Image (cartoon, grey):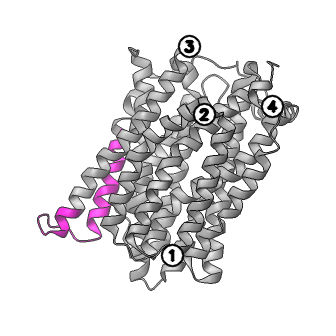
Amino acid sequence: MKLTKLERSWALYDWANSAYTMTVTTTVFPLYFKAAASDMGITASQSTAYWGFANSIATFLIAFLAPILGTIADYFGFKKRFFMIFLAIGVSANFLLGFVPETKWVLLLFVYILTAIGFSGSNIFYDAFLVDVTEDDRMDRVSTLGYALGYIGSTIPFIIAMAIILLSQQGILPFDGYTTPKIAFVLTAVWWLAFSIPMAKDVKQVHGIPREPKLILNSFKRMGRTFKNIKMHKPAFMFLIAYFFYIDGVDTIIKMATSYGSDLGIDSNTLLIILLVTQFVAFPSAIIFGQLADRFKGKTMLYVAIIIYTGICIYAYFMKTTFDFWVLAILVGSVQGGIQAISRSYFAKLIPKKNANEFFGFFNIFGKFAAIMGPFLVGYVTLVTGRSNYGVMSIVVLFIIGGLVLTQVNPEPEQMTEN
């Protein structure tokens, strides 16, 4: 499929911002923060707890803003403006991480929260721009391309950062242990900004609604009407509740994995290599999950993924060695992309197609709010018990609740008719 200029520009943003997820959220920054906190006299379990709290705060703030900003952005002239504002916040804060002194651990977390808000906020409007850059019959393929580019784009600056870190440790480059992560943060910010230029330059809002008086008030009214409409469709509404719980567990494992591995005594270089391999495992596994869903139905594969994730949490409780963490990472990679992709397609089959945009707005909102409980739960349990493995084990409850609620999603999508 030959892409248009608009489609390429849009898809490149996934290539651009996925580097942030890999380097800052998942790998280098959590290790950097824990090392800095340790040098300041903070215990491993305490720094894990504070990392969990920071992620909860960032997610809560963006989840609070997302519904109303998303609704306002439907009016012409706002979608691109909001995208650019959050892009500027994310890239600027990401760049600033490279210059905050490692002795200022509270400031480090504050700036990290700003990066997370910028990243998540810009993604809300990036996703919404899909309808403006392509036609309905090309939308799935263009969206999938962005997804694929994200996996590739996340690894390139990360590999460069890893090379700098390893060469510095060998004495080939004259950087100390705190300077190399800072270089990685600056590199990530530059990558994010550079490959965002096509999106910022070429993509325009095509679809929207005319502005009207009392714009903010009417936005709240529109949001209320959408919520009332979705409750009339019980299968879709019950699925959102199930999704709220189990996707929270998924996001929490992604965000807390590096911090937990560090608590186990696994050295930072090994952790980074393991998590890089996880990225390469995730994409083909998602494709396999999709093929299996065609044969065994999407709901069955969601149950399989939830059961595997429950097993991952239990396995994590007993982990002691680096080999254990390798096994854990491969297991996570095998289901991470699959559960996210199948959740989206399964939900699409439950909703009336004529209202797909409104319903997927709530799908994204539930996903944002879902990422609050898990990190907080891990942080709280770890802080109270003083043991990180208890914190990770606590995530099991999210998968159990999500799986139980999913059993109440009836009828199956295949049994439903167009509303």
**Front one among 2 and 85:** 2
Tell me the quarter of the image containing the C terminus: top right
Do labels 2 and 1 touch, CB within 8 Å? no
Do labels 4 and 1 touch, CB within 8 Å? no
**Of the image marks 2 and 1, the number of the one nearer the N terminus:** 1
Which residue is situated farthest in the bottom direction here?
A: 41
Residue range highlighted in magenta? 166-193
Side (left or right) of 367 relative to 228: left
The numbered disc on residue 110 is none
The numbered disc on residue 137 is 3
Q: Where in the figure is residue 168, as x and y percent of width and height?
A: 18, 66
The numbered disc on residue 47 is 1
**What is the quadrant of residue 3 in the picture?**
top left
Q: Please, what is the three-letter code of the amino acid marked with disc 3?
A: Asp
Q: Please, what is the three-letter code of the amino acid marked with disc 1?
A: Ser
The residue carrying pointer 3 sits among few (fewer than 14), some (14 to 19) or many (20 or more) residues within 10 Å by Cα, namely: few
The numbered disc on residue 226 is 4
Q: Is mark 1 on a helix, strand or loop?
A: helix
Q: What element carries label 4?
A: helix
Tell me the quarter of the image containing the N terminus: top left
The residue indicated by pointer 2 is 293
State the residue at coordinates (73%, 51%).
403
**Of the image marks 3 and 1, the number of the one nearer the N terminus:** 1
On whether residue 183 falls in the magenta region, the answer is: yes
Res 135 visible: no
Which residue is situated farthest in the front direction here?
A: 295
Nearer mark to the viewer, of 3 and 1: 3
Q: Where in the figure is residue 105, as x and y percent of width and height?
A: 45, 73
Q: Where in the figure is residue 186, as x and y percent of width and height?
A: 32, 53
